[in-house]
Image (cartoon, rainbow, N blue to C red):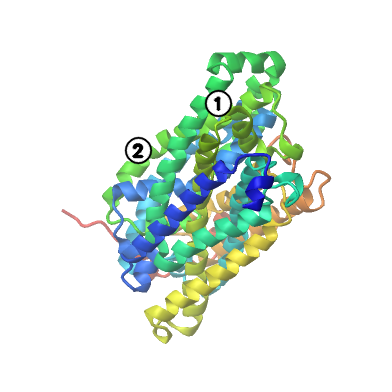
């Protein structure tokens, strides 16, 4: 009560956000009652998810703070070309990957009972060692993905809460460490209780929430700026460079960005969602509607960032991650609406965090502990307990890393996606190329890790801008070089090493039935 009296700003937005988080907790309790108590249900929802829930969970999982907070901040800096960099290519590439890779992996996973992609790679390439090599690399790439969510949530809440708690927090704004605790706690609660089934239901709710609130935010912000035409005219007057792609984004950079969306083919959390599908037909709706949903989310975010720059709205503390929250707080003076829209942003962030937490717990349990000690060494309750414990550990580690507030959300996301995207040749080779070998897979993973690590170290760790400006090599994104190296090593080593056994070929490439 004393805090409310001391506040120079109404706390209504926080009440709205709090109500939404309570709703999520309630949904977690309800969906946990659907939990069947088996490890299969905890890890892949007993492979029972239908078309609508699959669409919402897959789309919600791919839409992170990178898509909302990051894209707005990136457009604030680099303009309208950001849409072409990621959104337009993602809409097409994602659906293509779902069709050519996702459905085939779902069929293999269902046939042999896989719950992680590492289980598939180990069996396909006849190599337990490949699993132990992939595990730390995949975890290392997912953790920055988790950081994207916490950084985006912290920046957004800090931007809309300025002046609410004078004398309590710097600038009277809720600091990122408080937001991180709350967000991690809520997500951990429902994932802990119901596993991937709870995550799928939560993703469905949160996808609906952030899409609706995004449309509302775009409409209200456009109205506050005098309409889309007036907002664009103002930007043309003050920042015309933001309305021309060539001003900030070169041709080779633009083309090389096309490789980044291939990352969805190697996301371990997305692989796990694919395995929840009831049938191959469940993918049809996702393949068709996913590009439409991407446009619905990305177009408003990009335009808001461009318009905010044109209107002269400053990035709080120079942090472009906070531009979306700052624009909402500055232009929409209705605290109820500010709270609703902020809840929508948090919904997008949490719809990815839950699946990422789940996939790491699933991988640790099945790919490390159970694989090492044997399937018969653990019952279902023990497997679930192992997964829950590792999820808690990952949450704590991610939270601690987020306190250091590393590079911008968009650029950190690009590095994360570049690593996953560069592994894409391996998954395609695994499902379509019989000659792909164990040695080729191991060598290409090592090549990817070495080249990615080299570029990341020089750009983010010791670079002068510490990841705040994109690293370009001959005008191209590093992903182009990393992808090329991975592909060449994979093909070359596979061609000169022993092919897989006939048993493995028959297992993963069964001959079609002759009619």
**291 relative to 482 in the view: left or right:** left
Q: Residue at left 52%, top 55%?
A: 353
Front label number (2 vs 1):
1
Residue 253's x, y, as percent? Answer: 66, 34
- Structural distance between the alpha carbons of marks 2 and 1: 30 Å
Q: Which residue is mark 2?
A: 288
Q: Residues within 10 Å of mark 2 (few under 14, many from 20)?
A: some
Number of numbered discs overlaid on the protein picture: 2
SS for dot 2: helix
Instruction: Tell which of 17 and 353 is nearer to you.
Output: 17
Identify which residue, 76 or 115, lies in the foreground.
76
Residue topped by disc 1? 221
- Asked whether residue 264 is in view, the answer is yes
Q: Residue at the location (53% across, 20% down)?
A: 223
Q: Residue furthest left?
A: 515
Which quarter of the figure has residue 49?
Answer: bottom left
Residue at 50%, 45% (x, y): give it.
Answer: 16
Q: Position of residue 4 (x, y in %)?
A: 63, 47
Which of the two labelled residues, at mark 2 and mark 1, occupies the earlier sequence position? 1
Q: Position of residue 144 (x, y in %)?
A: 63, 55
Q: 230 or 378, which is in the foreground?
A: 230
Q: Is residue 486 above or below residue 92?
A: below
Q: Position of residue 493 (x, y in %)?
A: 58, 60
Q: Judge whether residue 96 can be spotted in this image.
A: no
Question: Badge 1 local density, few (<14 within 10 Å), some, or many (20+)?
Answer: many
Q: Residue furthest bottom?
A: 377
Secondary structure of the residue carrying tag 1 is helix
Quarter where residue 288 is shown: top left
């Amino acid at each position: 009560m004393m805090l409310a009296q001391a506040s120079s700003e109404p706390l209504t937005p926080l009440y709205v956000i709090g109500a939404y988080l309570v709703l999520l907790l309630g949904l977690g309790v309800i969906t946990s009652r659907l939990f069947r108590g088996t490890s299969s249900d905890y890890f892949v929802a007993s492979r029972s998810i239908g078309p609508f829930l699959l669409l919402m969970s897959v789309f919600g999982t791919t839409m992170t703070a990178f898509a909302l907070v990051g894209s707005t901040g990136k457009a604030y800096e680099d303009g309208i070309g950001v849409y072409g960099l990621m959104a337009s290519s993602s809409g097409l590439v994602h659906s293509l990957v779902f069709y050519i890779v996702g459905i085939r992996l779902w069929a293999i996973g269902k046939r042999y009972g896989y719950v992680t992609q590492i289980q598939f790679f180990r069996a396909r390439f006849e190599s337990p060692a490949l699993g132990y090599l992939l595990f730390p690399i995949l975890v290392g790439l997912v953790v920055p993905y988790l950081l994207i969510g916490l950084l985006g949530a912290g920046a957004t809440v800090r931007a809309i809460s300025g002046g609410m708690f004078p004398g309590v927090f710097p600038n009277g704004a809720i600091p990122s460490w408080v937001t991180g605790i709350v967000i991690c706690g809520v997500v951990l609660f429902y994932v802990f209780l119901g596993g991937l089934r709870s995550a799928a239901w939560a993703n469905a709710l949160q996808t609906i929430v952030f899409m609706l609130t995004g449309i509302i935010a775009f409409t209200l912000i456009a109205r506050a700026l005098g309409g889309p035409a007036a907002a664009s005219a103002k930007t043309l007057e003050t920042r015309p460079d933001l309305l021309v792609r060539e001003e900030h984004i070169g041709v080779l950079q633009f083309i090389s960005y096309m490789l980044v969306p291939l990352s969805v083919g190697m996301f371990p959390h997305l692989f796990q969602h694919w395995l929840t599908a009831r049938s191959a037909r469940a993918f049809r709706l996702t393949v068709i509607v996913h590009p439409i949903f991407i446009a619905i989310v990305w177009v408003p975010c990009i335009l808001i960032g461009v318009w905010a720059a044109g209107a002269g709205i400053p990035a709080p503390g120079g942090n472009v991650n906070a531009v979306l929250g700052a624009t909402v707080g500055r232009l929409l003076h209705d605290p109820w609406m500010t709270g609703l829209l902020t809840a929508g942003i948090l919904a997008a962030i949490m719809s990815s965090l839950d699946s990422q937490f789940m996939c790491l717990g699933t991988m640790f349990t099945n790919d490390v502990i159970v694989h090492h000690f044997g399937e018969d060494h653990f019952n279902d309750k023990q497997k679930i307990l192992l997964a829950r414990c590792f999820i808690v550990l990952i949450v704590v580690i991610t939270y601690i890393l987020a306190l250091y507030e590393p590079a911008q959300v968009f650029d950190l996301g690009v590095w994360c996606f570049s690593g996953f995207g560069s592994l894409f040749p391996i998954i395609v080779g695994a499902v379509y190329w019989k000659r792909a070998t164990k040695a080729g897979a191991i060598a290409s993973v090592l090549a990817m890790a070495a080249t990615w690590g080299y570029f990341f170290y020089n750009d983010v760790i010791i670079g002068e801008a510490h990841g705040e400006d994109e690293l370009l090599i001959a005008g191209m994104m590093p992903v182009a070089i990393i992808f090329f190296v991975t592909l060449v090593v994979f093909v070359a080593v596979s061609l000169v090493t022993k092919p897989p056994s006939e048993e493995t070929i028959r297992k993963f490439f069964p001959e079609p039935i002759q009619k």
